[in-house]
Image: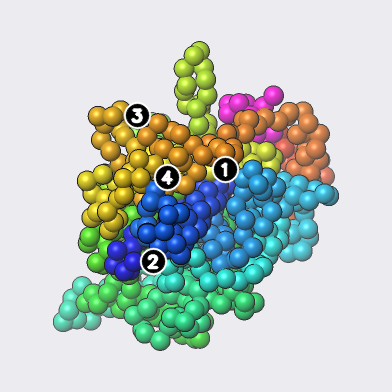
C-alpha cells in the first residue's frame, strides 16, 4: 500500500503519577491488537487473494503509529512504548503471560521496584538518598525510580520496528525548564528611543527523539530546521540521554527529585526558530557555551496533556494525510479534567492560593501549543481513552466514585500496593479493548476515503458495529484497528476458542487494604523518613531541644496518617 494511503496515528499520554499503570495497560493491549492484525495481514499477503485459505474478513488497510507524545507518567509510558516496539523479546500481558514476563509496561508500572526483600513503597521511604546528599532533594526517595529506569531501558533483542510503527517515529517528552529560555522582543522597529525592548521567558519545552535507521543518522540532524535527536539504543550514552529525559518529565515537583539536564547548544539554537518561525522583532538570547544546562521538573506542570505538540508534529510530517483526514489522535488520560463552572468561594489566604493555582494551571493548558487544532473534533480524528469502570448497585450498573485504585492522594495511591496498580493496568487493557472495537472507528460511508480500501463483505460482517448498539437500523461504523479476537462485532460474538479470556477481558476485583496492617508495616518507616526530612531541612539549632524534634515526627505522621486513611476510605479502598 502506498504511504499516502496509510492512516497516521499520534498517541499522546497525560500525566498520572502512579496511575500510569492504567496508561500502560492501554498501550499493552493496543500493541497486542496491532501485532495480531499485522500477523493476519502478513499471512494474507503471502497467500494472495486467489488462494482458498485467504481470509477475506481481514481488512488490509495500513495504520501506522507516527508520533508519541507524553508528559510526566505519560512521558514514561511514551518511552516504554518505544522500547516495546524496538524489542523482539517483548510479550504482551494476558492469559498466556499472566506474570508479565518480558513486558516492559507490566514490569515498570505494576511490578515497579518490588522484590523479595521489600516493596516499592518501602523503598520510596528509605533514607539512603538523604544520607547520600546530606540535604533534601525530594519528599520521597527517588533512587528506586532510577533502578526501575535502568531495568526498563534495556532492549534485550533489537528489531526493526514493526510495520504498524513509522520508520520516522517521533517520541516527544515534555519538560518544565526552571531556568527558561529568554527572548528579546523589540516593539519599536526603528529603535528611536534606544530601548532594548522587553524580555519574555519560555519555561515549557520538550525532548524529541527518533531511532536510528537507514534514513536517520545518530545525533542532531544536519538540516538546521529539524528539531530532534536520533538515538541508537545500543549506545549507552544515548540510552542515558533517554533515561534522563524520561525521568525529568516525571520529576513530580517536591515529591520526586528534579533533574539537572544538559543539552547541546546547537539543539537549543534551533528551538527559537521552531517556536516563533521567522517572527520579526524577536531575538533569542542563547547562552554561550557548547551545552545548555537547566533544572527540569515534571513536564505536566506546564503541559500535562501534550496533544497539541503531538498533533503539530504529526501535521508537519504528514500535511497531505492530515488534509485528507487520513490521521487520528488518541489521548490516553487517566485523570481528564471534569471541572465545571464552579464559582470561586472564600477570601482566606489558602482559598485564594488554591484558586490561583487552579487558574494558572487551566490557563497554561488553554494556551498550549496547537490547542485550537486539537479541539477541532468535527472530522472524527480526535479520540480519548479514559478510565471507565461500572459496578452493580441496586440492580443498575453505575459508575463508582473512583474508577482507578491509584487515584487517591493526587495519584500517589498506587505506590501503596501492587494490587492497586494491577487493577488499573487491567482496567486500561479492558477500556482499550472496548475503545478499539466500538469507538475508534469511521462512519461506514467514509471508509473508502479515510482507510483507502473497499471493504469485502466478510470484513463488514465481522467488524462493523452500529450505534445504538445492535440496532440494525443504527448508524454503521468500521474500526480503524480491527481486533481479530472478534468473530462478529455487531452482536459481540467473540473468538473465545482461539483467544480464551483475552477475547473479553474481565476486571480484577477492586482491591482494598487493612489500614491496621498498613500502619504495622509502614508507620515506623514513614516517621523515620519524616524525621530525616526535618533534620536536613531545618538546622538543628533552630529546634529548641530534642522534644520538638520528636513532636515534629509525631505531628507529621499524624497528618500523613489522617490524609491517607481518609482518602482510602472515601475511595472504598479500605477493608
Callout 4–callout 3 Cβ contact below 8 Å: no
Q: Position of residue 289 (x, y in %)?
A: 49, 86
The disc, 1 or 2, on the residue closer to the chain's N-terminal end is 2
Q: Quadrant of the N terminus?
A: bottom left
Q: Quadrant of the C terminus?
A: top right
Image mark for residue 499: 1
SS under mark 4: helix
The earlier-in-sequence mark between 3 and 2 is 2
Vertical arrangement, residue 25 with respect to residue 144, above or below: above
Q: Of marks 1 and 4, which one's residue comes earlier in the chain?
A: 4
Residue 320 point in image, percent of width and height: 24, 66
Q: Position of residue 174 (x, y in %)?
A: 46, 62
Location of mark 4 (residue): 436
- Whether the residues at callouts 1 and 2 have beta carbons within 8 Å, the answer is no
In this figure, which residue is indicated by the disc labeled 2? 202
Instruction: Say which residue label 3 marks.
Output: 470
Dot 3 alpha-carbon crowd within 10 angstroms: few under 14, some 14 to 19, many 20 or more:
few
- Local SS, label 2: strand
- Whichever of labels 3 and 1 marks the residue nearer the N terminus, that label is 3
Q: Residue at x 75, y 43 (%)?
A: 526
Amino acid at each position: 500500500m502506498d504511504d499516502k494511503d496509510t492512516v497516521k496515528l499520534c498517541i499522546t499520554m497525560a500525566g498520572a503519577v502512579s496511575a500510569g499503570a492504567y496508561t500502560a495497560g492501554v498501550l499493552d493491549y493496543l500493541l497486542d491488537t496491532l501485532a495480531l492484525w499485522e500477523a493476519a495481514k502478513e499471512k494474507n499477503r503471502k497467500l494472495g487473494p486467489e488462494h482458498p485459505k485467504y481470509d477475506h474478513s481481514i481488512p488490509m488497510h495500513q495504520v501506522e503509529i507516527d508520533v508519541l507524545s507524553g508528559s510526566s507518567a505519560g512521558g514514561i509510558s511514551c518511552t516504554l512504548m518505544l522500547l516495546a516496539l524496538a524489542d523482539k523479546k517483548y510479550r504482551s500481558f494476558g492469559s498466556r503471560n499472566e506474570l508479565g514476563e518480558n513486558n516492559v509496561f507490566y514490569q515498570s508500572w505494576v511490578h515497579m521496584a518490588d522484590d523479595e526483600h521489600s516493596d516499592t513503597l518501602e523503598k520510596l521511604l528509605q533514607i539512603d538518598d538523604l544520607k547520600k546528599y546530606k540535604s533534601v532533594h525530594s519528599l520521597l526517595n527517588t533512587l528506586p525510580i532510577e533502578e526501575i529506569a535502568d531495568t526498563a531501558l534495556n532492549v534485550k533483542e533489537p528489531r526493526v520496528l514493526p510495520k504498524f510503527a513509522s520508520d520516522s517515529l517521533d517520541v516527544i517528552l515534555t519538560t518544565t525548564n526552571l531556568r527558561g529560555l529568554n527572548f528579546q522582543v523589540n516593539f519599536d522597529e526603528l529603535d528611536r528611543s534606544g530601548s532594548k525592548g522587553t524580555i519574555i521567558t519560555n519555561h515549557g519545552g520538550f525532548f524529541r527523539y527518533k531511532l536510528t535507521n537507514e534514513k536517520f543518522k545518530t545525533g542532531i540532524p544536519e538540516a538546521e530546521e529539524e528539531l530532534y535527536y536520533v538515538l541508537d539504543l545500543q549506545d549507552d550514552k544515548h540510552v542515558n540521554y533517554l533515561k534522563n529525559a524520561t525521568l525529568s518529565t516525571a520529576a513530580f515537583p517536591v515529591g520526586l527529585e528534579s533533574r539537572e539536564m544538559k543539552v547541546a547548544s546547537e539543539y537549543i539554537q534551533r528551538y527559537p526558530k521552531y517556536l516563533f518561525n521567522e517572527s520579526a522583532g524577536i531575538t533569542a538570547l542563547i547562552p554561550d557555551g557548547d551545552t545548555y544546562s537547566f533544572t527540569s521538573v515534571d513536564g505536566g506542570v506546564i503541559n500535562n496533556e501534550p496533544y497539541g505538540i503531538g498533533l503539530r508534529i504529526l501535521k508537519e510530517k504528514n500535511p497531505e494525510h492530515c488534509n485528507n483526514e487520513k490521521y487520528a489522535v488518541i489521548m490516553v488520560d487517566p485523570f481528564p479534567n471534569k471541572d465545571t463552572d464552579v464559582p470561586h468561594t472564600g477570601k482566606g489566604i489558602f482559598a485564594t492560593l488554591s484558586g490561583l493555582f487552579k487558574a494558572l494551571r487551566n490557563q497554561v493548558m488553554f494556551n498550549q501549543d496547537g490547542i485550537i487544532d486539537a479541539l477541532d473534533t468535527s472530522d472524527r480524528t480526535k479520540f480519548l481513552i479514559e478510565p471507565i469502570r461500572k459496578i452493580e448497585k441496586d440492580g443498575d450498573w453505575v459508575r463508582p466514585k473512583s474508577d482507578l485504585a491509584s487515584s487517591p492522594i493526587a495519584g500517589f495511591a498506587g505506590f501503596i500496593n501492587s494490587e492497586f496498580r494491577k487493577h488499573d493496568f487491567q482496567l486500561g487493557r479492558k477500556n482499550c479493548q472496548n475503545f478499539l472495537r466500538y469507538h475508534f472507528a469511521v462512519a461506514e460511508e467514509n471508509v473508502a476515503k479515510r482507510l483507502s480500501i473497499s471493504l469485502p463483505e466478510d470484513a463488514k460482517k465481522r467488524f462493523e458495529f452500529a450505534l445504538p448498539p445492535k440496532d440494525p437500523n443504527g448508524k454503521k461504523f468500521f474500526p480503524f484497528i480491527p481486533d481479530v479476537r472478534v468473530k462478529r462485532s455487531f452482536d459481540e460474538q467473540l473468538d473465545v476458542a482461539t483467544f480464551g479470556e483475552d477475547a473479553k477481558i474481565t476486571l480484577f476485583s477492586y482491591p482494598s487494604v487493612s489500614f491496621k496492617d498498613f500502619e504495622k508495616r509502614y508507620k515506623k518507616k514513614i516517621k523515620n523518613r519524616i524525621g530525616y526530612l526535618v533534620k536536613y531541612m531545618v538546622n538543628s539549632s533552630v529546634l529548641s531541644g530534642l522534644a520538638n524534634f520528636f513532636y515534629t515526627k509525631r505531628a507529621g505522621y499524624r497528618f500523613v496518617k489522617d490524609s491517607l486513611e481518609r482518602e482510602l476510605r472515601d475511595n472504598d479502598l479500605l477493608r
